[in-house]
Amino acid sequence: MDKFVINGPCTLRGAVEISGAKNAVLPLMAAALLTRGKSVIENVPNLRDVSTMMRLLGILGAEVEFEKGVITIDTTRLTSFEAPYDLVRTMRASIYVLGPLVAAHREARVSMPGGCAWGPRPIDLHLMALERLGAKITFEHGYINAAARRLKGAEVVFPISSVGATAQALMASVLAKGVTVLKNSALEPEIVELAKALRSAGAEIEGLGSSTMTVTGVETIDPFRYRVMPDRIEAGTFAAAAAATAGRVRITKCAPAHLGAVLDALKVCGAKIDIDEDNIDVQGPDRVEPVHVVTREYPGFPTDMQAQMMAVLCRAKGTSTVKDTIYPDRFTHVPELRRLAANIRLDGNLAVINGVRGLEGAPVMATDIRASSALIIGALMAKGRTEILRVYHIDRGYETIEKKLRKLGADIQRVSD
């Protein structure tokens, strides 16, 4: 396994370019299964999760090519409708193939998903939506079986806003007979991105960006060509790192409009932030001010930025709090930040962070994608050498993050163990 070795503290300076959004690419790759022919997705980051989805589509019989940020998916000759355990267990987003397969090919067999090892993240809402659309769902030996002659339009009301379930229902409903109304849909930009791509392929979808979307099913949709938006979480992570290290960083080719809540919190911390159409300039304060953060569904503060924000607050001059209302158990980074001498106390889904004058380098272990980036931010602030183990987690969600940080002046190396 690789590890990162970081010598700190450092001050980040320079410019960094943001890659395409992982959480938009993965459902788009699954959506290609709704079509017959070659779909092309541009601005694709080179990530472990993208590679995993490529392998999964290949097992289904699709021909997949990836070169210079462009993925071509040819679904002309699918040979299987089963997503096996060995792949699905490594990435929860594999569940996205379930809806497109049953919608376009009448059947699907998908292993129960795995992925990041924190908290319960059930797929009940995915299955509820498919059942509402007429799919027969059964379980056998750890697999989900779904079947339907043709899905039928229906009203689907999500009891809580769920990005994954909304994407699943949206993909399945574009080929369903009749009209589907999705209520309490997720508002995240990645959902809007998926809907735009599907509409470019001939799907009839109304209500983009609202909590109620209406889908009028069509017989077929065409292969599509679509350029993916920038990754808002990667942009937010670099903004947080700049603020934490009293740095001056220009974040380019991003979408500032998707980061309102994150940038507002960093401003409260004392960061000076200027934005234009697709750039963000962040100048970090000499000492971070405390802030109180509560994660919410979009456009609120994203749970995917909770860990990074907590790292920033470890050196605040006072007491801060971070409350996660989306995933109450998403705090596996806390004991690792404590190893860097952070003062953090947990009370259920509330973290109380008492700022310290300085952090200290130490060996730590990454446990999921965003926890990994929080540990990197902590290491950049810490005095001395920090080793971050199990960085395969961060490779799932950040494209060559160590190279981007080195260009900003960080002393970070990837070492093969």
Image (tube, helix red, strand yellow):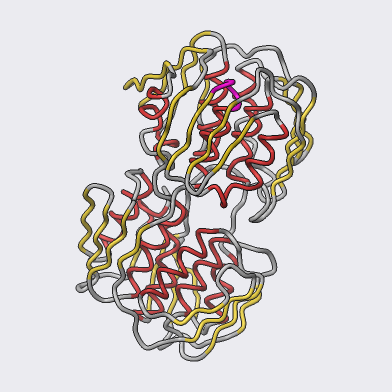
Up-down relation of residue 339 to residue 92 (above or below): above
Q: Which residues are magenta?
A: 243-247
Residue beneath the point at 56% across and 9% down = 383
Residue beneath the point at 46% across and 82% down = 204
Residue beneath the point at 70% across and 44% down = 324
In the picture, the quarter occupied by the N terminus is top left
Q: What is the chief secondary structure element of the magenta stretch?
A: loop
Up-down relation of residue 20 to residue 122 (above or below): above
Query: In x, y percent, where is residue 21?
Result: 43, 50
Between residues 5 and 85, which one lies in front from this camera angle? 5
Query: In x, y percent, where is residue 192?
Result: 51, 65
Residue 331, by quadrant, is top right
Left or right relative to 94: residue 336: right
Query: In x, y percent, where is residue 46?
Result: 32, 44
**Residue farthest to the bottom?**
178
Q: In the rendered structure, does residue 244 fall within the stretch colored magenta?
A: yes
Left or right relative to 179: residue 316: right
Residue beneath the point at 44% across and 37% down = 393
Residue 283, by quadrant, is top right
Between residues 268 and 70, which one lies in front from this camera angle? 268
In the picture, the quarter occupied by the C terminus is top left
Q: In the rendered structure, does residue 55 fall within the stretch colored magenta?
A: no
Up-down relation of residue 104 to residue 15 (above or below): below
Query: In x, y percent, where is residue 167?
Result: 50, 66
Up-down relation of residue 224 to residue 381 (above or below): below
Between residues 62 and 373, which one lies in front from this camera angle? 373
